[in-house]
Image: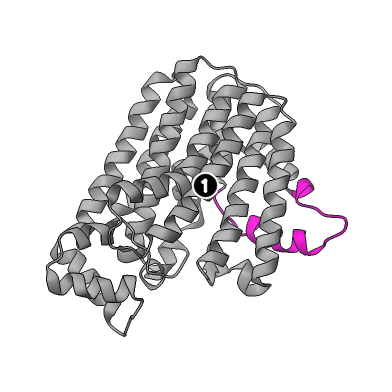
Amino acid sequence: MSLDEHNKDRVAKPHDRLALALAEDMAAVNTLIRTRMASEHAPRIPEVTAHLVEAGGKRLRPMLTLAAARLCGYDGPFHVHLAATVEFIHTATLLHDDVVDESAQRRGRPTANLLWDNKSSVLVGDYLFARSFQLMTETGNMRVLGILSNASAVIAEGEVLQLTAAQDLATDEAIYLQVIRGKTAALFSAATEVGGVIAGAPEAQVKALFAYGDALGIAFQIADDLLDYSGTTASIGKNTGDDFRERKLTLPVIKAVAKADATERAFWTRVIEKGDQHEGDLDHARALMTRHDTLNATRVEALGWAARARAALDDLPAHPLRDMLNDLADYVVARLR
């Protein structure tokens, strides 16, 4: 592929087109992030934060806030503060997640807890949460503060629920949905909702933006969980099979357990509940999922949530950014087709 073809392919991706359309706003967000992640007294803070913030992530969540605000006619300046807030909350949760999950790779690079230590990751994550609250209060909008502070609590609650539910074969699809609504969709929906609120959009549009973010986040997480079993390390930016090794009951496993016979259930009890895993167990787990068609069933659910996200956009005004958000809902599940 030539350089021109490569660039054309990049811009063809919805999140890249979104980044291009929001380039000026995103530049302001990045400047604000770099300014606010600084610390006069603790140089470890910008070291750890920069490792993750500068790792080349898509900045999808802050772009959702910017796009929602612009789509609703907002001309600034506080959408930049809110976008930076959303990114700080997201980065804080990543730092904490990698400690909890004992992860060694994030976005194709060593995790902060591996390069530094768990204490640094947890404390810097706490610092970023505090910074996010400082930023959101600067908007002077109490409803925005309520939405983002509630999302922060729901995220933490979802992570704790996952701790108790992850290795319990009694965990069903309803609990799984509650977990991923907390750990992923809560920030997506808050990111889009606050964009509408800061723009003073009609309530119907604010609700539509929330519904879009919620469905997009759920589709995103189900796709991520599916790719852990059916993708490649290069395509997902982390080691495939990590969820299995960490004994997480994600949707492909939950569906397989629901269809398991006595022998298969004994296997899942051993590898998930007891953590007694051996060479070849991951391949066997994949074989059981294939036997019961749970990978395809999970794929169908992800596509369904993406369709819900697209449908929510019908209540928003016609705008090029709305078209990009529509394409983005397709893109988060495109790897599953």
217 to the left or right of 21: left
Quadrant of the image occupied by residue 131:
top right
Compared to residue 293, the image places residue 74 above or below, namely: above
Q: Which residues are magenta?
A: 34-58
Name the residue tied to disc 1. 155
The residue drawn where x is 32% and y is 58% is: 226
Compared to residue 220, the image places residue 64 above or below, namely: above
The residue drawn where x is 49% and y is 29% is: 321
The residue drawn where x is 52% and y is 29% is: 193
Residue 180 in percent (x, y) is at 41, 48
Residue 61 in percent (x, y) is at 54, 42
Placement of the N terminus among the 4 image quadrants: bottom left
> What amino acid is at disc 1?
Ile
Which residue is at the front of the view, 228 or 190? 190
Which residue is at the front of the view, 311 or 134? 134
Residue 330 in percent (x, y) is at 35, 41
